[in-house]
Amino acid sequence: MPPVRTLGQLLEDEHLLTWIRDAVGGLHAYAAAGAEKQGKRLAMAVTCTGCTAKKTCCHSKVVARLYEGILVASDLVAAGRDTPELREQLRAAAEAMETTPPRDWRRPCVFLDERERCTVYAVRPVPCGAVLVYTNPTLCTTRAAPIKAYIPNEEYAAATAFEEQFRERFALRKKVGRRYLGVLPRMVLVALEAWHRTDFRDYLRQLSWPSDEDIEQQRA
Ligand code: SF4
Ligand code: SF4
């Protein structure tokens, strides 16, 4: 009989956090290199690196994969930030985000601090690290002129491919036509709620996961 372990114990025993962290970090690096390469072709520099403007990109709807939520949750657990107050904030943000179209969502991310800094920067999901623009940072807020952005299609395809490996390693059977992803606060909350459960696979499987069509609607 394999040992009965909580999600947190499984992650630690099998060094799965390092594996996820390397995959997500690798995609951040790939996006940064890709954006720089494209910038050279366009004779434009990526402006996010030195951005001191209001982080409007962190006031947007972020759809993340469960493994990215697990990575953020691991950081919160390790830093003693998994509190009832934070879970309530995540729950409220998730419910609001799930019922608001992306174009109407203009609220700060739960992880953005008062200085407009990401408090989970090292473990932020791929969609956060792949938002890279070439235009003046103030345009991200004012929209006074078109924004020129890097399109991370390859990174998103690789992140989706990694989801297959993630389910394999975690013995999470795929629900037919469904994907383990959702809005970022929901994915982090789900990961925190699963963290100390030995029945975390049953808990995760019984949740309502979206189909590819649902995902397109969430992003529309
Ligand atoms: S996307 Fe815009 S607001 Fe966000 S870091 Fe880049 S330049 Fe700044
Ligand atoms: S996780 Fe960090 S980078 Fe992503 S939206 Fe939130 S504050 Fe911004």
Image (spheres, rainbow, N blue to C red):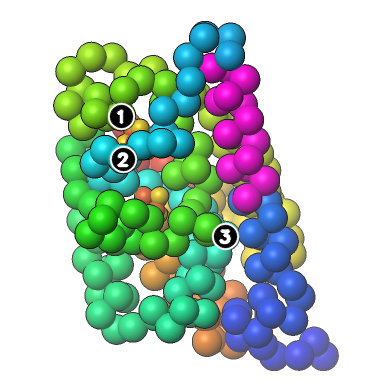
Asked whether mark 1 lies closer than 8 Å to ligand 1, one says: yes
**Residue holding disc 3:** 67
Q: Amino acid at mark 1?
A: Pro
**Residue holding disc 2:** 52
**Is 197 above or below relative to 177?**
below
How dense is the environment of label 2, judged by Cα within 10 Å: few (below 14), some, or many (20 and up)? few
Q: Position of residue 178 (x, y in %)?
A: 53, 50
- The residues bearing labels 2 and 1 have C-alpha atoms spaced at a distance of 8 Å
- Determine whether the residue tagged by mark 2 lies in a helix, strand or loop: loop
Q: Position of residue 71 (x, y in %)?
A: 55, 64
Q: Are marks 2 and 1 in contact (CB under 8 Å)?
A: yes
Foreground pick, 165 / 53: 53
- Determine whether the residue tagged by mark 3 lies in a helix, strand or loop: helix
Q: Position of residue 93 (x, y in %)?
A: 24, 60
Foreground pick, 143 / 84: 143
Q: Are marks 2 and 3 in contact (CB under 8 Å)?
A: no
Mark 1 vs mark 3, foreground winner is 1
Q: Are marks 1 and 3 in contact (CB under 8 Å)?
A: no
How dense is the environment of label 1, judged by Cα within 10 Å: few (below 14), some, or many (20 and up)? many
For the point 63% across and 40% down, which residue is it?
29
**Residue holding disc 1:** 137
Q: Amino acid at mark 2?
A: Thr
- 188 lies left or right of 40: left
**Is 110 above or below relative to 195?**
above
Mark 2 vs mark 3, foreground winner is 2
Q: Amino acid at mark 3?
A: Tyr
- The magenta segment: 25-39
Any mark on residue 193, and which?
Answer: none
For the point 65% across and 36% down, which residue is it?
30
